[in-house]
Amino acid sequence: MQGTFLRIHFAATGKLVSADSETYLLEKSRVAFQLSHERGYHIFYQIMSNKKPELMDLLLISTNPFDFPFVSQGEVTVASIDDSEELLATDTGIMKEGTPLALQELPGNLVCEILIHQEMALSWNSTKEE
């Protein structure tokens, strides 16, 4: 599966100057598995950075990545990445896009649903009545 990242460049006056795009491979498997030297999707670690403590109450998760096997199989920290600052940058980007407040919380909710339900096991018990 491929994704496209579009970067738009503006002048100080606000006029469009240029744009470029990059195509990249979306790694769906990194949600559920990482090699020892890899990290899962950065949004997981940004939310758990506790930069916005209200998220912990709202999303019902802890700040400890080791509570969630999906994000603690590989690296949980990267020296060159400040997850707290990246969370603020992510929030700023969402707000600048003019996303309605109700939808601004949706990505965090989805991420935490993955974390909370990662070990859920489903089974099917068939009976004659079914």
Image (tube, rainbow, N blue to C red):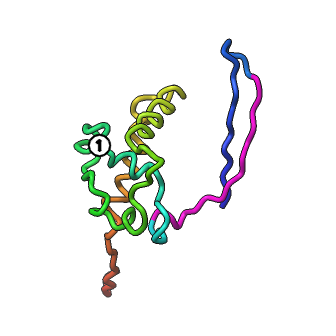
Q: Amino acid at mark 1?
A: Asn
Range of magenta residues: 17-31
Q: How many numbered discs, if any?
A: 1
Q: Quadrant of residue 32?
A: bottom left
Q: Main secondary structure of the magenta part?
A: strand
The residue shown at (66%, 52%) is 3
Furthest residue toward left: 57
- The residue singled out by tag 1 in the image is 50
Question: For this rendering, which residue is in front, 9 or 120?
Answer: 9
User: Residue 1: x and y, percent?
Assistant: 66, 61
Q: Who is closer to the viewer here, 43 or 118?
A: 43
Determine which quarter of the picture holds residue 50.
Answer: top left
x, y percentage for residue 72?
36, 65
Look at the numbered disc 1 and give the secondary structure of its residue. loop
Q: Residue at x 25, y 39 (%)?
A: 53
Looking at the image, residue 30 lies above or below residue 60? below
Q: Quadrant of the C terminus?
A: bottom left
Farthest residue toward the top?
13
Q: 10 Å neighbourhood of mark 1: few (<14), some, or many (≥20)? A: some
Q: Does the magenta portion include 99?
A: no
Q: Measuring from the top left, give residue 35's x and y in whole percent.
A: 48, 71
x, y percentage for residue 96?
52, 26
Looking at the image, residue 21 lies above or below residue 96: below
Residue 21: within the magenta?
yes
Residue visible at 30% across and 37% down in the picture: 52
Closest to the observer, 7 or 104: 7
In the rendered structure, the answer to whether residue 21 lies left or right of residue 46 reads right
**What residue do we see at 25% from left, 37% from top?**
54
* Identity of the residue furthest to the bottom in this view: 128
